[in-house]
Image (tube, helix red, strand yellow):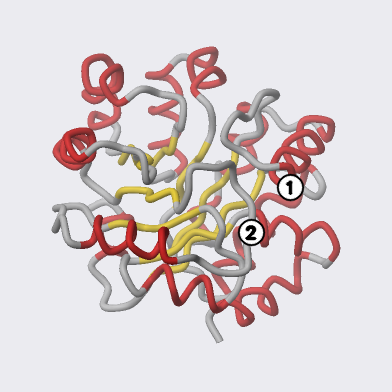
Amino acid sequence: MNRINKKLQEDKKLLSIYFTAGYPTLNDTVSVIQNLEKSGVDMIEIGLPFSDPLADGPTIQASSTQALKNGMTTEVLFNQLKDIRQSVSIPLIIMGYFNPMLQYGVEAFCKKCQEIGVDGLIIPDLPVDVYNEEYKATFEKYGLINVFLITPQTSVERINFIDSISNGFIYMVSSASVTGSQSGFGDEQTKYFKRIADMNLKNPQVIGFGISDNTTFTQATQYAKGAIIGSAFIKHLSTKPVHSINDFVNFIVK
């Protein structure tokens, strides 16, 4: 069984952390992952930086720009992760845009992910229909879970289709905006969380975008299996050393 599926079966609310590979410095990637696991994080999303990150807010965009300047590439990331399973056991997901994967070769990319122990991919700009028709078989061949995003504007039909072709979790974007932290969720977002929860989808939902503290984590996980934090963690990394990651995680899940 894929590590993501095993983790989703645990009787707890999950905390997933996103960070940009190669940030703050090129060789921080493995140390960040190891420290996140030691701090009790349940899943990690490793961002593969891209020059035109459409869904990312200013914080993650800035970290991507810095990581690219530091020399991060697909090949460098794979090389950094080649021995990661000797020290890390929690699910690892690569989040990135489709262009670098296409350039690398989709099958070669998936094969490499399987070799180093990556469990899934999140590719915001890969259309669901294109994935289903052209790439689903390849992902499954290499044991990779592909995670799709839904937003408050996603139609019921689309959500049901995504649910039908998914075999992990659904990434629920909390609002129709780019990534970034906020102080709390309003009535409209709470209604959206409840509406999706009431659909009783076969795949659990994990909520991302706008989660930055214990309040927003608790609000999100009232209606979902877990929550994803990105921008707030990147901000922490930009001013605090890697070995202080435990302080950040404790602040979220008090």
Q: Position of residue 218 (x, y in %)?
A: 45, 77
Question: Quarter of the image holding residue 122?
Answer: top left
Pick whichever, 193 or 167, lies toward us: 193
Q: Nearer the viewer, residue 4 or 62?
A: 62
Mark 2 and mark 1 in contact (Cβ < 8 Å)? yes
Please name the residue shown 16% across and 40% down the image: 160
Classify mark 1: helix, strand or loop.
Answer: helix
Q: Which residue was labeled with disc 2?
A: 181
Front of the two marks 1 and 2:
2
Task: Report the quarter where the C terminus lies.
Answer: bottom right
Q: Is residue 19 above or below residue 248?
A: above
The label on residue 85 is none
In the image: residue 138, left or right of residue 153: left
Disc nearer the start of the sequence (1/2): 1
- Residue 245: x, y in percent? 69, 71
Q: Quadrant of residue 212?
A: bottom right
Q: Is residue 6 above or below residue 64?
A: below
Q: Percent position (x, y) of residue 158?
A: 22, 33
State the residue in front, 121 or 54: 54
Crowding near pointer 2: few (<14 within 10 Å), some, many (20+)?
Answer: many
Q: Which residue is mark 1?
A: 59
